[in-house]
Amino acid sequence: MSISPARRVTFHDVFSVPEFRALWASYILSAAGDRLALVALTLFVYDRTRSPLLAAIAFAAGTLPYVIGALFLSGMADRFPRRKVMVTCDVIRAVLVGAMLLPHVPLVALIVLLYAVTTFQPPFDAARSAILRDVVEGERYALAVAVLQTTFRVMIVAGTAAGGLVVAFLGARPALGVDAATFVVSAVLLRVGVRARPAAASKESANALLQLGAGVRVVFGDRALRTLVLFGWLAAFYEIPAGLAAPYAARLGGGPIAAGLLIAGSQLGAAVAMPLFTKRIGPLTRLRWMGPMATCTCGVLLLIALRPGLVVSIAILALSSAFGMYQIAANTAFVERLPNERRAQAFGLASAGLVIGQGLAFLVAGAAAEVVPPSTVIALGGGLGAIAACGLSVRWRDMSPAVGRHSARHLGRQASPVGRQSSLAGRQASLSRQSPVHAARSR
């Protein structure tokens, strides 16, 4: 179904695509299953051992294994059919979680199984991100990304809370059973609802290290892609408040509820703003505002240095999160410049870098909060992020036709080669300036 360039794309345009509905439903189930397994097993380990260290090791399954999977397994979604990769990852995770339900499984084995479950999340995510561009194109792709990112942010808050409730009422083992079922249903939805497509890349480069090296050269060998990835990694700065929510809430005289509200505030703004921003603002305008909004996302956190109360703090975090909608522009420009045969590996690299950056940021911020107030640490993180965002904005302004001084002349030159497409598609193509990476992309 084609979209007239005379009107804005709508949510109906996105959800009218059956394959997207299947991907979205599968994403909800998969994300819910991940959070449920993480919360259930963390509480289960602590309940059996009363050891904060072992509980923390179990919760760390959300970080280290994800990085390993993102770096070395994401490339599978380029070498093999992407629907098959997603279904296989869901089936493997269902089996691994099912193994946790066996009686008398040692705690060490449970933690190892949870790490294995998390390791297979990145290739699933990479395959979904890569195939999404084939399922929806043009402005529908941008709005689809906004919908998925909003879903992800809602699942962070609601999924963790729901996981705690499920464990409280059903117990850890039944909760793990529910988790296994979510992966099975997700696999069925993908198998039935998503069309089979051939692998994007040949299987000749099956070596994971060679695949990783090729992905690094594609992403970091291109100045524009490198800049867009760094825009994405700015999240490590403006998500510091979530990592310091508990000590910050304690400084305000609050407890777990206040900490939960701060975390919710850090996600709420983007969850509301992303779809509206994508739906109402055109692609060139989004790219033009990307740098300033990235700067505001981090810079707003400087207000925390004034040590406001809980309600104002939540509002500041929500405002910072709302400016994070610039990530939609970065994501769309990133995928448009990627060759199809490297798309999944590139997404894996971007995800791994973000997780590593967030882990380091949380570690440094936590250490700093031992000697200075959490409000000072959050403000410093926001200030450093704003400085980095300003530098990236200057770099992007020099290379993007959407924000450069010669954008109109460049768009005019690009209109002729894409005259057979809609004007919307022509504007989208011009964003990539026909770089060698973009020219190699297989459609």
Image (cartoon, rainbow, N blue to C red):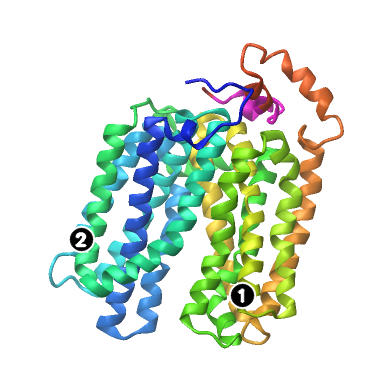
Give the quadrant of residue 363. Answer: bottom right
Q: Is 433 covered by the magenta stretch?
A: yes
- What are the residue bounds of the magenta stretch? 428-441
Q: Taking the image as drawn, is residue 243 in sight?
A: yes
Vertical comparison of 387 with 22: above or below: below
Counting from the top left corner in percent of width and height, residue 63 is at 46, 63
Counting from the top left corner in percent of width and height, residue 279 is at 59, 39
What is the number of callouts on the image? Answer: 2
Q: Disc 1 designates what residue?
A: 311
The residue drawn where x is 79% and y is 45% is 395
Vertical comparison of 287 with 375: above or below: above
The residue drawn where x is 52% and y is 23% is 442
Residue at the outermost right position: 405
Tell me the element at label 1.
helix
Q: Which mark is in front, 2 or 1?
A: 1
Q: Taking the image as drawn, is residue 171 in sight?
A: no
Q: Disc 2 designates what residue?
A: 177
Q: Is 139 covered by the magenta stretch?
A: no
Vertical comparison of 308 with 87: above or below: below
Q: Is residue 399 left or right of residue 137?
A: right
